[in-house]
């Protein structure tokens, strides 16, 4: 999906016509930043072509209000001459590119194609993250404790000491947690843990080498 946000009706109509020639994606227009923000909670992911200089909510205001949607909305700034500094600020706020108005059709096509591809990549990462979280959530509390110890690079004997369990019990828990995660190597288990948001608070390289 492509969203056009611009208070200049003629400019927006021209962009809509140009985009219809180079993409089969759906196109929805908004005459102001405020109108876009009103609709934002119900919008599907996509590319947002966002004018910087608008009455009411400016492009920068829209970006500031959309920070929790940067994973599924790729913002491309539409910048008039003399607004380069604002376009740079927009990039700092998460926009992936900017176009100076008026923009050549080939440049518009390239940037929008890249933005839509960016959304696909981010969507894949989001699915992987949710799948990893579901796998980690399937672990028992003790299995989770052992996984956390492995993330922190602790040898089995140290994890056993910390949890007041035997070395053999830790090995059993490690075997069970790796089975639940559907992996055979510690590196794969750690990869899932990191995708799920668990954090390495130490150096696990030594333990990884011994796995």
Image (cartoon, grey):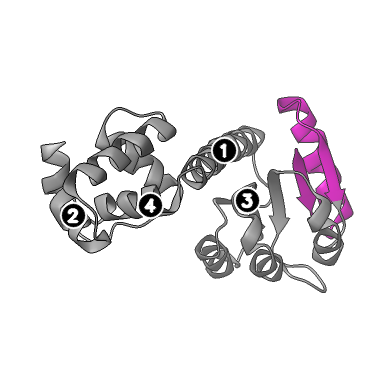
Across and down, in percent, residue 179 comes to 38, 30
**Disc 3 secondary structure class:** strand
Q: Quadrant of residue 95?
A: bottom right
C-alpha separation, residue under disc 2 versus residue under disc 1: 30 Å
Q: Is residue 52 left or right of residue 43?
A: left
Asked if residue 84 is among those painted magenta in the image, a careful observer would answer no
Assign the N terminus to one quadrant of the image: top right
C-alpha separation, residue under disc 3 versus residue under disc 4: 46 Å
Foreground mark, 3 or 4? 4
Task: Give the residue pinned by disc 3.
Answer: 76
Foreground mark, 4 or 2? 4
Task: Give the residue pinned by disc 4.
Answer: 142
C-alpha separation, residue under disc 3 versus residue under disc 2: 45 Å
Task: Give the residue pinned by disc 2.
Answer: 154
Any part of residue 6 in sight: no
Task: Give the residue pinned by disc 1.
Answer: 127
User: Which region shows up in magenta?
Assistant: 1-29
Labels 3 & 4 near each other (Cβ < 8 A): no
Where 59 sits versus 27, above or below? Answer: below
Assign the C terminus to one quadrant of the image: top left
Q: Residue at x 87, y 62 (%)?
A: 35
**Disc 1 secondary structure class:** helix
Q: Quadrant of residue 23?
A: top right
Labels 4 & 1 near each other (Cβ < 8 A): no
């Amino acid at each position: 999906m492509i969203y056009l946000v611009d208070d200049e009706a003629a400019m927006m109509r021209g962009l809509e016509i140009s985009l219809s020639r180079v993409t089969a994606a759906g196109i929805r227009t908004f005459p102001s930043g405020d109108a876009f923000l009103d609709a934002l909670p119900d919008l599907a992911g996509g590319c947002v072509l966002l004018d910087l200089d608008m009455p009411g909510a400016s492009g920068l205001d829209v970006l500031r209000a959309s920070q929790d949607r940067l994973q599924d909305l790729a913002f491309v700034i539409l910048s008039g001459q003399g607004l380069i500094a604002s376009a740079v600020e927009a990039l700092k706020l998460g926009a992936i590119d900017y176009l100076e108005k008026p923009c050549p059709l080939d440049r518009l096509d390239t940037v929008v194609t890249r933005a839509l591809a960016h959304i696909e990549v981010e969507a894949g990462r989001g699915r992987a993250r949710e799948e990893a979280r579901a796998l980690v959530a399937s672990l028992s509390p003790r299995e989770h404790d052992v996984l956390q110890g492995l993330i922190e690079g602790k040898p089995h004997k140290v994890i056993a000491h910390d949890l007041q369990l035997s070395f053999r019990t830790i090995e059993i828990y490690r075997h069970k947690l790796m089975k639940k995660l559907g992996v055979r190597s510690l590196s794969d288990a750690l990869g899932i843990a990191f995708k799920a948001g668990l954090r390495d608070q130490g150096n696990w390289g030594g333990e990884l080498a011994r796995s």
